Amino acid sequence: MIKPEVVADHNQKQAPTLEADYAALGEKLARRGVDIEQLTRAADTFAVALPSWGVGTGGTRFARFPGPGEPRNIFEKLDDCSVIHQLSQATPTVSLHIPWDRPDDPKALLEYAQARNLAFDAMNSNTFQDQADQAYSYKYGSLTHTSEAVRQQAIEHNVEVVELGKKLGSKALTVWIGDGSNFPGQQHFRNSFAHYLDSARAIYDALPDDWNMLLEHKMFEPAFYSTVIQDWGSSYLAARETGERCLSLVDLGHHAPNVNIEMIVSRLAQFGKLGGFHFNDSKYGDDDLDSGSIDPYQLFLVFNELVDIQQADSAFAPFYMLDQSHNVTDPIESLMYSAAEVQRAFVKALLVDREALLGYQNSSDPLMAQATLKQAFNLDVEPVLQMARQRAGGAIDPIAAYRASEYRQSVARDRPQSGQSGSGIV
Amino acid sequence: MIKPEVVADHNQKQAPTLEADYAALGEKLARRGVDIEQLTRAADTFAVALPSWGVGTGGTRFARFPGPGEPRNIFEKLDDCSVIHQLSQATPTVSLHIPWDRPDDPKALLEYAQARNLAFDAMNSNTFQDQADQAYSYKYGSLTHTSEAVRQQAIEHNVEVVELGKKLGSKALTVWIGDGSNFPGQQHFRNSFAHYLDSARAIYDALPDDWNMLLEHKMFEPAFYSTVIQDWGSSYLAARETGERCLSLVDLGHHAPNVNIEMIVSRLAQFGKLGGFHFNDSKYGDDDLDSGSIDPYQLFLVFNELVDIQQADSAFAPFYMLDQSHNVTDPIESLMYSAAEVQRAFVKALLVDREALLGYQNSSDPLMAQATLKQAFNLDVEPVLQMARQRAGGAIDPIAAYRASEYRQSVARDRPQSGQSGSGIV
Amino acid sequence: MIKPEVVADHNQKQAPTLEADYAALGEKLARRGVDIEQLTRAADTFAVALPSWGVGTGGTRFARFPGPGEPRNIFEKLDDCSVIHQLSQATPTVSLHIPWDRPDDPKALLEYAQARNLAFDAMNSNTFQDQADQAYSYKYGSLTHTSEAVRQQAIEHNVEVVELGKKLGSKALTVWIGDGSNFPGQQHFRNSFAHYLDSARAIYDALPDDWNMLLEHKMFEPAFYSTVIQDWGSSYLAARETGERCLSLVDLGHHAPNVNIEMIVSRLAQFGKLGGFHFNDSKYGDDDLDSGSIDPYQLFLVFNELVDIQQADSAFAPFYMLDQSHNVTDPIESLMYSAAEVQRAFVKALLVDREALLGYQNSSDPLMAQATLKQAFNLDVEPVLQMARQRAGGAIDPIAAYRASEYRQSVARDRPQSGQSGSGIV
Amino acid sequence: MIKPEVVADHNQKQAPTLEADYAALGEKLARRGVDIEQLTRAADTFAVALPSWGVGTGGTRFARFPGPGEPRNIFEKLDDCSVIHQLSQATPTVSLHIPWDRPDDPKALLEYAQARNLAFDAMNSNTFQDQADQAYSYKYGSLTHTSEAVRQQAIEHNVEVVELGKKLGSKALTVWIGDGSNFPGQQHFRNSFAHYLDSARAIYDALPDDWNMLLEHKMFEPAFYSTVIQDWGSSYLAARETGERCLSLVDLGHHAPNVNIEMIVSRLAQFGKLGGFHFNDSKYGDDDLDSGSIDPYQLFLVFNELVDIQQADSAFAPFYMLDQSHNVTDPIESLMYSAAEVQRAFVKALLVDREALLGYQNSSDPLMAQATLKQAFNLDVEPVLQMARQRAGGAIDPIAAYRASEYRQSVARDRPQSGQSGSGIV
């Protein structure tokens, strides 16, 4: 972790500007009847999980361009995650990916995390790659393969991930599979979906009572003609057929072009099946870009739904995770910046005057309804985010503090790389 | 209707070529173990309903360019439909649209249709336009409007359409609404969907026991930010919540870009909710182009699913309708040509060697699985379609026979138009 | 126009809040080295033309739902436009559409406009609809029709529009045609484009030396398989072949899904062919939604390019027009709100620290490069817009002032409507 | 290569059916005035280049699932290519990719190819990956990097590829770069394009007089916000600025959703800049699926343009290459099947009655114009393809002959794999 004095020094320099900005914003909000302190406390409650795989440099099928000091194992990944949380104060948990992060000693891993103020969020299984030691290949499917033996192997892997997660304090299993087809005719659609349901139920049966199973859909990639869990409709059906604690997970980059994602959020929540999010942004496909970097208003509209749902149902508490591929940035910087972007969308959504909005909706006044959203979105809540971070012990400007700390240079020295350039998987 | 001797004369000229082509195809199919006579009989069973609105020239929001001899009322529309069926022998029913086709005397309309060998398919209600005499406007919604009075008016219109359909021998109500929003914030998503469910149930309660209610979803247009029944997921949920005989209807042009429509067909059927189709084709949006004109392989893949489902469930019998906008062609010609294109896809799907296909699927042989589909698709089944039509009393080449009949020139004389050209809104 | 005392009264009430907000923002900007007064003066220079057709309620091919007090002729349209400019102080010009706005007496129209502080921007021709008195139909094309007589008729219409525009003080002709096809094979691509080039050159020959000819491309609609000027590539080629003062016009809603529009802006400008904009927003197709209502960050990114280009080439001065379809709002309100949204994007783009940005670009620091854009975008510049309006004599909050004025109620009394509701085509 | 007796044995068994099918088709075509022999000779002239990288199993960023007997070097790749050409008789050339295929001894490679009846098509450079020995990384660009040194390195690599190609008898260089950005602001659009033009000219200067330089555009991937050569417009501009023999190459999978690719083909040809193709198919993005597997009608429409252009300009001779990623099939099978699919589209396009088509276009008869295309497309030309192959010494059914040969089993024994599963690049 970064030396506290580096953070303190950074904050000390930034504090006067922050205080002036914060006071000015507080007065402005007060003129509109909003208490900035309440908002800052709400901002402080926001948390989003880090993906363990996100602290390494990502890549495409064409190439991967590694950066210096990449973590070589799950312990070094946790080191990086702890820096992110230390500075951003919005990412107290880590989502693991098995087998990439499989520990020899789960207890040691748990203690290592706890020592860094980190806990474990949803566990992720992996049946979209073959592992060296496995009996059957997933080339033609895993949970939906036409062969029962392959399906059984994939089920058992998921059960193993649940068992591991229990030891680590996780409370959820996220299931994403690449199963699908590249050719019309390759796969029998109804048979494949029936296999999926059978497999999902078998995994669900192994779930502890206080766990959720999260089904992640995706339109395409790695399958390029059809995907078994291709959209929210199939995800919903699978979750409903599987069990009460089986829910749908929405990844912002997994939809068809032009689709209204905030409406999907609403539908799944209305029918009790919205379980979690993978936050990122995209312009073309599953680009896994940094959250809010392409369409920050869409991210705000998603949180506008989430806040509205939460106010109607206080028990509503979906899992929030970042899921991004950092191909051209320092992953630590991207994750800190992205956590703040998601938090920013949440805080702005809190600022929506919901009573006024409902009034405009009910009186068919679309211009003022949209203006009500824009009034919240246009506010510059940066001082609220900064103040919440500072008070929690983080950095006013996490990127600047991180660069000042020279953490990257330090781990670049401590983590010699294998030297292989190119050729990565995310 | 067209004089039988015109058709007979046409067929007589075409018959020698057809017989040679048919014999050659018969031998070719026989070499592959397929009986062409059985295929021709199956082709003859195919039927797709005509949309009453389809025999007039369509348009866009920019302009409409009328053609000569457009039908001026439902009786003239039925005249045109009877010509289409006479020549194509694949379109024995007509789908009405109320209020556009509301008859003063339903009994007279029924007799008029019967005299032309026509029956009535699904009835279509209309709450996406305002009528001169209605109390409330649908500008801000109909079945999902925030005002109960507006919703009630829309419900009552649907019930009226059912009552009318009962008198006409129809067995289904198709409900498509334009309800949605043009701005983020305009509509409360969960409230709107809840209103939809309430309204749909109220309509369903008025449905005779042997009727189906068909819910048609659409991604966008006329609403451009959100649509209440925007995709098959929402359609499925609404159908399930409404009742057992409430099913989803799939229009081929109502999906997001790149979406795998044949998979949606499969999913809805697997969960017992596939009720019908609006056939057309599209390249960009709801273009309402002629069926099979842009992507004939996709149409074949849809029928590949339908035939597969039918072979697994003999009770499966969705409603088939054409729904196209004929902006630049003679609508009669487009509808005859399109009916044959849909029939062609059906016949080719019958030719798929399903046992071989399942074998390739189960042995993970995607190349041969896709080749099995292509082998059926690549066959030129035109002689089968022609022979089926000829034997049923239709025309070997409906377009050529129609042009020879000079029907269009005849109705152009009999149906003087109002003279208004254009009529667009921007 | 609205009584000055209504505006004054409105501003008086809002002024204290504005002054406090403006002072606070001024201090915040000063802490970052930015002079708010300079920014406010720059905001005041911003102008965007109003579309004459935009003050009426728009519609879709399904329906149009008129509102009260719609303007019935070009004079009433100018009345509405003058209110928009009075309150927003950002829309000093109007773009006419011929024949919709063809005046009997151009001189009288010009004087009417001048009396309302309005001038005329680009003229728009119309060969996508048939007029009652024209010899040939545009059903199968206008400037690209296979018949020379039709092409000549369309050329002459454009020349007539130029002649009219000269009398009105316009300096540009915008040419958008719907020419294209609905079926593969309908149109010969190379012949159609060759016809377009010939026709465009003939129009260009009639252009005064100080005019620009603006070519507007569009992916689809009203043609649904192919469009002659379908994208910026075809637009560029046509503009280059036509002449030096023939330029491309970019409408934000006329692109394929996912396309990077700001990059198109950059390319056209780099090759000297960016001539103008039709501002609006869209989620699906050419939705013609209010500017900035769906993706305000994209609008900002477009202006980020424009400001960058302007700083490199002070002669760069494209035509800016709003082009929206107001289906569910009061058009006057939408146009005022939209003008402010475009202005907001411009002002935020001025706030981008271009020196820092270029530095990050040159040192391959994408995280800080994007953060530099976000720092500008996240600022709440509403006080700058409000102050610029107030100082220019407009309203601090144009919507509120407009509603207070009861202008709509007043014109609803003065402009009895024809009574026809609806008016759609399917 | 496969033993001639295996092919002969296969053909002998298939010949009677082929002869019957061929005779029947010949009579059918004769009834329509078409000489099947002429068509078969034309089919025989068709050739498309094989991508050297295509004979290995492809993958996605998530995983690669290798198959047995994958070629381990360029010589084994040529062995596989020779089998493909032996059986399909449509793929006499191979397109190399440097550095993947860089030979120690170019002369030996050339002789090796010639001994297998193979020649070399366009050379492909690679600056989208880093190589172990290179001085500068392409992480932030190659030909468009902000650093001159990096650009120079990328230019020199291309020049080296040209030098190598000269020794191998190639006549073209294909340049595809991944340069672009993942964040708004990361790249200065105009500067990047200016760098591209400078770099392209520098490469062009090294080109022999009888070579072409082919610029390949792509909408996205590996860059996910912007790509420097993102569409045909940018490709055209770059080709025009670079030089007369610099042309655009169209990859069928590199476009925005819904884009009309055949129109792009037409535009580039009309302005003298259509240089070549990468054939494949796609449903979502750059899926690199087998040609014709998703939308065979689109492939036909592309060839409909190509045949039309060729008939107008006999000198028109673009480079044809397959560029596919074979993730789930035996690459040899996919390439043989795909070559035949492209050839099928070409043969069907030859069958279009162009005189009739032009007549329908000129008389505004879209229904018959599209029917004219469909009449050609619907014909089953499989016997023509089979006969052309058989006569040229190939296999009537290449897949069946290949499986009978047990070539794959043989090379699986001869080419032990490294054992690594997963983790590929295409």
Image (spheres, coloured by chain):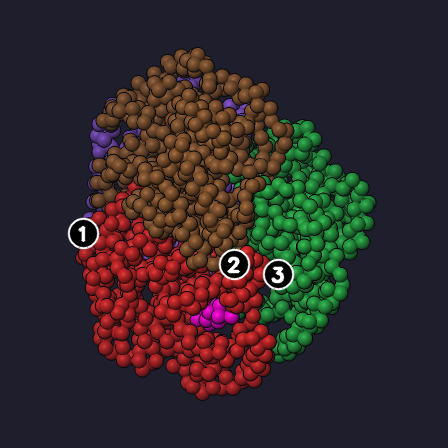
Chain colours: A brown, B red, C purple, D green
Determine the CA span between mark 3 and mark 1: 58 Å
Front residue of C418/A339: it is A339
Determine the CA span between mark 3 and mark 2: 25 Å
Q: Main secondary structure of the magenta part?
A: helix
Q: Which residue is mark 1?
A: B148
User: Tag 3: Cα neighbours inside 10 Å, few (<14), some, or many (≥20)?
Assistant: many
Residue B362's disc is 2
Q: Earlier in the sequence, mark 1 or mark 2?
A: 1
The percent position of residue B34, horizontal first and vertical second, equals: 54, 75
Tell whether label 2 touches label 1 (CB within 8 Å).
no
- Residue visible at 37% across and 76% down? B92
Numbered disc 2: secondary structure: helix
Residue B209 vs residue B223: left or right?
left
Numbered disc 1: secondary structure: helix
Number of numbered discs overlaid on the protein picture:
3
The percent position of residue A257, horizontal first and vertical second, equals: 44, 47
Bounds of the magenta span? Answer: B337-351
Any part of residue C33 in sight: yes
The percent position of residue D88, horizontal first and vertical second, equals: 69, 61
Q: Which residue is mark 3?
A: D341
Above or below, B174 relative to D281: below
Tell whether label 1 touches label 3 (CB within 8 Å).
no
Front residue of B184/D23: it is D23
For residue A206, what is the image quadrant?
Answer: top left
User: Tag 2: Cα neighbours inside 10 Å, few (<14), some, or many (≥20)?
Assistant: some
Any part of residue D374 in sight: no
Above or below, C72 relative to A15: below
